[in-house]
Image (cartoon, grey):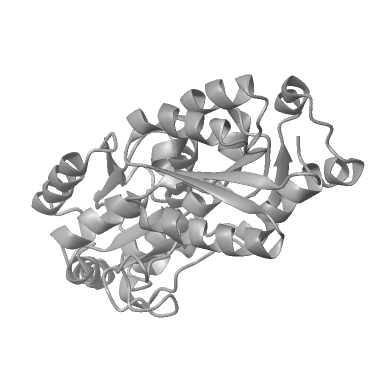
Amino acid sequence: MWKKRVVVAAATALMAVGLLGGCGSDNGSGADKTYKVGVIQLVEHPALDAANKGFVDGLASKGFKDNVKIDQQNAQADQSNLNSIAQRFVSDKEDLVLAIATPSAQAMANATKDIPILGTAITDYVQAKLVNSNEKPGTNVSGTTDMNPVEKQVDLITRILPNAKKVGLIYSASEVNSQLQATRMKAHAKEKGLEVVEATVQNVNDIQQAAQNLVSQGVQAIYMPTDNVVASAMPNLVKITDEAKIPVFPGEDNIVKIGGLATYSVDYYQLGFQAGLMGAKILSGEAKVSDMPIESQKEFKLVINEDVAKRLGITIPADVLQEASK
């Protein structure tokens, strides 16, 4: 899940006719104006869908509901679609755009330097070259980060599988955020004495072969970061890993729900909701996107899929069960 000059001009005009004076922060602004908001989503899967819904609900919680026209667009993981959608939003002169996932934000940022862009489901805005810094973006982009507690997730693997020695790692080589998480995972796994077998994919068609390669090399678990390509093909992955009785530890809870075993997870709905609150401030003229720090989640929930544990014959330790949401 931006024209700064347009937003400021609109707010000034409303003040001139005395409309803003009776409008509190929870009621939005410009009751007689319909704001145009574009949403550019990389691909359809549960995490990104949850972020999308959270954003819409976040806007609505601040009064931006009936006075907002939201143009929802899904690129179906196609770069040319992303570029076309971005150009369309620029032509339509959207007041604000939500970009869900890094490639969406990059396509949108390449298309305009004027329209305010909020991102969500993005791990590192600086590395993706979307902002100058997390504290003060200095560009027309800000938003919420889904940086995972990668080290805690690796530790969780050893808590549930204390005898594990070899762990698979699967991710898309073309996703900057996935590369960042993979680097952190490998570094911490080494500290824990784990051997990591790496498998990268370019698109969903590579998932089956990558999974089979990991299985054939004797991995005892597979770690999967928050990766849009792999997440969109999770059924293909677990079809192979379940047969081999190998658990998948994904980066977030929506993937646990559809076949992963366990994780410490960010909440994509909440991250989208936070982005919606940021969007309300931009539309109301309360804040400029270039000055809005990147927001993050501080608490992470432990989630376990007990059905998967039973299916794979894995006994979850009592202390992990006690801590977890199931």
Whether residue 25 is situated above or below residue 71 in the rendered picture: below
Q: Determine the residue positioned at 34% across, 37% down.
A: 43
Q: Which of the 4 image quadrants contains residue 242? A: top right
Q: Does the rendering let one see residue 35?
A: yes
Quadrant of the rendered image containing residue 191: bottom right
Q: Where is residue 226 in the image (x, y as percent from the top left)?
A: 50, 47
Which of 219/294 is in front?
219
Say which residue appears at 28% left-offset and 50% top-offset. 104
Mark count: 0
Left/right placement of residue 109 relative to residue 173 reads left
Q: Is residue 323 left or right of residue 283?
A: right
Q: Where is residue 178 in the image (x, y as percent from the top left)?
A: 44, 53
Identified at 29% across, 56% down, the residue is: 105
> Residue drawn 30% across and 67% down?
130
Query: In the image, is 31 to the left or to the right of 302?
Result: left
x, y percent for residue 179? 43, 57
Residue 293 location, x and y as percent?
44, 74
Front residue of 319/45: it is 319
